[in-house]
Amino acid sequence: MDKFQYAVIGSGPGGYVSAIRAGQLGLKTVLIEKEERLGGTCLNVGCIPSKAMLESSEMYYSATHAFEKNGIKVGKLGLDIPAMVANKQDIVNTLTDGIRLLMKKNKVTVLQGTGELVNEHTIRVNNGDEVSEIEAENICLAMGSVPIELPFMKFDGKHIVSSTEALAFSEVPESLIVIGAGAVGLEMGSVWSRLGSKVTVIEMLPQAAPFADKQIAVLLQRSLKSQGIEIMLETKVTGAQVKKGKVIVSYEDKKGNKETIEGTKVLVAVGRRAFSGSANVEKAGVTIEKGKIPVNNKWQTNVPHIYAIGDLIHGPMLAHKAEEEGMAVAEILAGKHGHVNYDIIPNIIYTHPELATVGLGEETAKEAGFDVQVGKFYFRGNGRALTLGDADGLCKLIADKKTDRLLGAQIVGVRASDMIAELVTAMEFQASAEDIARTMHAHPTLSEIVKEAALAVDKRAIHG
């Protein structure tokens, strides 16, 4: 039986990053993955392929809506959805092939198969007819999550689908009903809306992007509506029937009225659940509570040499959170100080405009007891945003009125996903709004919007 110092079950962003870091630190490491390609949901059927489809659909939308305004004349446009999907897959293959090369470079053994705990130190790897066992001093559980399936609306892979199938439609659906106005629902809705589908998003809560500041979420919703996406809030889906190739969805609005809506496809995007029971963790004595695996501040389960990270544990189900946790576990095992700052995890929706947040919003900061001071700056006052033809947006900074320390940042606008990084860094170093305001930002850039918002905290924005 092969013996390892560290075994990681699951090769998503948390798992593969943890394995690479452990290899860098000299630990004899094995990575176990049930699928042929490494990278987990994020690289294969999540973050990366969805961004590829968003980029392709945005190019098409720009060609049909923005080129003429910019003096560009084109002939009749057409769509080749299979080619678009193939391009997405090429990107996925490039990245997943790269991860396998990184495993080799860092001397990480890769075993394909389903990893199951036999006891506290033994893992059985089942790959069809081939079954093997390994022994590990330390084990990291990183099996990720799967889409939540509504009990009254089961996935059939054709009419009622998860994001996996929505990334691979062979043609543009005539109409698409999206259940859930979170990141997945809004992003996939945007893709197919841009390509010509009539998209309706149904959300049970009173705002789209529920994690975001209310003002920012309203601006995003307004922008998506102008692009042709209908968003129905405070609306509860109660059932669905497939009839003659169409899906009839029943729902109840906030006034209690019961209605139906018909669509060609239905995407259920109401969240994900931890895949916690997939490795028979109970056999090793690992506790599962309400579908999650409890861990301490060093990511140890109740069995001290077995760790858990990513979607299996508390916190937002985000790839970058899992990466940081995976890094931290590997460093702890190597005798270093692993750390994750959960107060500054950026959260992003890659629609157009994008929505990006970090820290507290205005409402949550007040609820937490802070006396807040807010600085706002609209994209329409920024020269670079105007040259990009994307002046629809707002940057909002929330600071403690007493200390001026930055508590949070909320951005809706073009390239918000890139802009938020500066604010994450600032919050990591406990910067004040004044620190950002006094930092020189190149002109003309979108980053100047952040500087102006910081100046606005003290009511001294220059261009707004």
Image (spheres, rainbow, N blue to C red):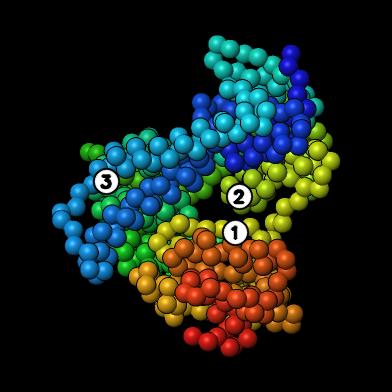
Q: Which residue is mark 1?
A: 346
Q: Nearer the viewer, residue 113 or 283?
A: 113
Label 3 or label 1, whichever comes before in sequence order:
3
Circle 3 sits on which residue?
172
Cα distance in 3D space between marks 3 and 1: 32 Å
Return the residue nearer the eye: 351 or 4.
4
Quadrant in which the N terminus is drawn = top right
Question: Looking at this view, is 453 or 401 the one in front?
Answer: 453
Type of the residue with mark 1: Pro
In the displayed image of the protein, which residue is found farthest to the left? 76
Whether 53 is drawn above or below 221: the answer is above
Residue lying at 59% horizontally and 28% vertically, measured from the top left: 33
- Residue 320: mark in rendering: 2
Residue located 51% across and 48% down the image: 271
Say how many tags the image has.
3
Type of the residue with mark 2: His
Between marks 3 and 1 in the image, the one whose residue lies nearer the viewer: 1
Mark 2 → mark 1, Cα distance in angstroms: 9 Å
Say which label, 3 or 2, has the lower sequence index.
3
Which element carries disc 1, helix, strand or loop? loop
Label 2 crowd (10 A; few <14 / some 14-19 / many >=20): some
Sooner in the amino-acid sequence: mark 2 or mark 1: 2
In this view, which residue lies farthest toward the right? 335
Amino acid type of disc 3? Val
